[in-house]
Image (tube, rainbow, N blue to C red):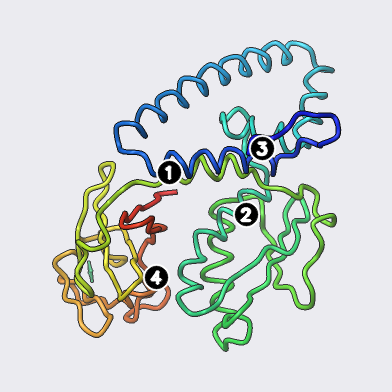
Amino acid sequence: MPVSNSAAEEVTLEKLLKDIESLESIVSNWDEQQRMTVRALRKAIDDLNKEALARVIRGLKKNPEALSSLKELTADEVVYSVLRHHELIKPSLQERIEQALDSVRPMLQGHGGNVELVAVEPPSKAVVRLIGACSGCPASELTLSEGVEKAIKEHCPEITVIEKAKGICATAADMPINFISPFARGQEKQWIFVANFDELPDNELVVREISGESVILVRLDSNIVCYQNACAHLGMALDMGEVKDGVLKCPYHAFEYVLKSGECITVPEVQLHTHAVRVVDNRVEVSFS
Ligand code: FES
């Protein structure tokens, strides 16, 4: 249902996004030609809005006082989300940390665990909590240092201190910026069709070339995983590797990987580069973000 602009009903980012999502779910059932037309229309409108906003920002930059007002305005979640969507501002520190955590979540979730961001203390500290199976795991310190910390430091070099939290999660109000652009996430998560679910044989590698990158897909019963087609040892292609009992063996120097999680059995410090996968009806889609 479209959002009413009546004074009685407050317009929020959540409501606006719900409108977009409900329309997108209708469009997702249309045929490919129709979806392409909608994408083209959306891009044309986006291009127009981006150009207009870029001109506004360029104009404001000439006036330091106006520029500082604009910076304050980015604390508004709708303003922030739209400017992020058009890549006119950089992602907030919190958003970059969440992106870092998203990059390690498939590996943690493969073990029934997860990680959550508890607090950001600018300029250099983040507090995270390992949850689920990760919290009580004897290897949790290694998970934190080799997985979570490494990912955060790669995405956010300014974060030098990462603490592991205990106890209950901080409230959003405790955080300096307590939202993440859902628009930006939507933009960064470009889902690309790679195969039909029923085309993928169980426990067999299927190789695909997506946007110039070679990836391997494996169906494990009702789940599908997708990895960059590159061994974590010397980057050689894995698609000719042997699959046995849920383990993939590199055909070059026999590094072994757990297919479900991408973890390397031979050298536990490394792992396969994972891509997010979703299945919509019979369509298997991959995101490279
Ligand atoms: S390249 Fe795969 S084990 Fe060496």
Query: Would residue 148 be found to the left or right of residue 275 on screen?
Result: right
Q: Does dot 1 land on a helix, a strand or a loop?
A: loop
Residue 83 locus on image (x, y percent) = 64, 30
Q: State how far apart marks 4 and 2 are (Cα).
A: 21 Å
Badge 1: few (under 14), some or many (20 or more) residues near its Cα, within 10 Å? few
The answer to whether the residue labelled 2 contacts the one labelled 3, judged by CB atoms less than 8 Å apart, is no
Dot in front, 4 or 1: 1
> What residue is disc 4 on?
270
Q: Does dot 2 land on a helix, a strand or a loop?
A: helix
Asked if 107 appears above or below 157 in the picture, the reply is below
Mark 4 or 1, nearer chain start? 1
The circle drawn on residue 97 is 2
Asked if 70 appears above or below 256 in the picture, the reply is above
Question: The disc labelled 3 sits on which kind of residue?
Answer: Leu
Q: Residue drawn at (25%, 56%), measured in percent from left and top?
A: 196
Q: Nearer the viewer, residue 11 or 75?
A: 11
> What residue is disc 3 on?
16
Dot in front, 3 or 4: 3
Q: Residue drawn at (56%, 53%), measured in percent from left and top?
A: 99
Mark 1 or 3, nearer chain start? 3
The quadrant where residue 22 appears = top right
Question: The disc labelled 2 sits on which kind of residue?
Answer: Ile
Badge 3: few (under 14), some or many (20 or more) residues near its Cα, within 10 Å? some
Q: State how far apart marks 4 and 1 are (Cα).
A: 26 Å
Query: Would residue 21 be found to the left or right of residue 194 on screen?
Result: right
The circle drawn on residue 190 is 1
Question: The disc labelled 1 sits on which kind of residue?
Answer: Gln
